[in-house]
Amino acid sequence: MPYTPFLLINGNQRYLFDTGFADNGPPTTGKLAAQLDAVGLKPTDINNVVLSHYHGDHINGLRNKAGQLVYPNARVHVPAPEHAFWMDDARMEAAPPGMKGAFMAVRRALGNLGGDQLVKFEPGAVIAPGITSIAAFGHTPGHTLFRMDSEGQSFAYVADITNVPSLFARAPDWSVLFDMNPAMARMSRRRVFDMLVKDKMMAGGFHFPFPAFGTMEVSGTGYQFKPVAT
Ligand SMILES: [Zn+2]
């Protein structure tokens, strides 16, 4: 499964959507710094990190293994309901042992951010000029997508609305193990896919096959992801 964070540059504002793992992940991950370097950017050039949800593959890269912030100059924009869910200590206490690690990873990545460094927003809000958040709950309680509109064109970063489009776009009513509320995730998936089709939007998904860009079409009772030509 690939992990592909997205970078949006708008004037002097650089928005990184989700972080991957930095040096905390499996051996074939952790290439983001080199990829930024390839486009002439350093981690200190990132002034906004935008998180879709708090699963480890999306947030662990906020800090390196030593605990330092990888993007020290960035404000970190987070969906308020996602933050509230994972930072609830009572919920962590009540969670089954197998899930406690996920709660602790959230605290490691986000627990000690400075006062104005963490920016909570309500899903649906415009988070910056041209960037609108979209509630797509189900995969996690506050899973949120982002649509970008510019000069008559639109792009949606759809995060984990589906993990493997060749399976779960074709059969949008199937659920992947990681969907915390499968019924809600199914509804969100169909609603978002319908939006991509209707608005003829370019879409990018965190786990889509690299380069993770393409369009969605209706196909039978489901959808088909059409990757951009590379
Ligand atoms: Zn993910």
Image: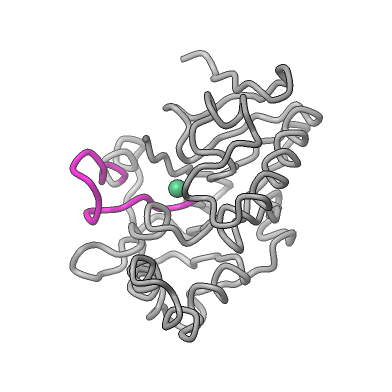
Q: Is residue 61 left or right of residue 58?
A: left
Instruction: Give coordinates of residue 222: x percent, y percent.
Output: 69, 25
In the image, what residue occupies the spot 46% across and 52% down?
18
The residue lying toward the viewer, choosing from 89 and 2, is 89
Instruction: Give coordinates of residue 47: x percent, y percent.
Output: 47, 60
Extreme-top residue of the structure: 229
The residue lying toward the viewer, choosing from 136 and 145, is 136
Q: Is residue 19 magenta?
A: yes
Q: Is residue 191 left or right of residue 212?
A: right
> Image quadrant of residue 171?
top right
Main secondary structure found in the magenta portion: loop
What colour-coding does the image apply? one colour
Q: Quadrant of the N terminus?
A: top left
Q: Is residue 30 above or below residue 211?
A: below
In the image, what residue occupies the spot 49% across and 30% down?
212
> Image quadrant of residue 197?
top right
Instruction: Give coordinates of residue 167: x percent, y percent.
Output: 53, 27
The magenta segment: 18-32
In the image, what residue occupies the spot 31% across and 35% down?
38
Extreme-front residue of the structure: 96
Q: Is residue 191 magenta?
A: no
Q: Tell how many labels.
A: 0
In the image, what residue occupies the spot 46% across and 15% down?
230
Q: Is residue 4 above or below residue 63?
A: above
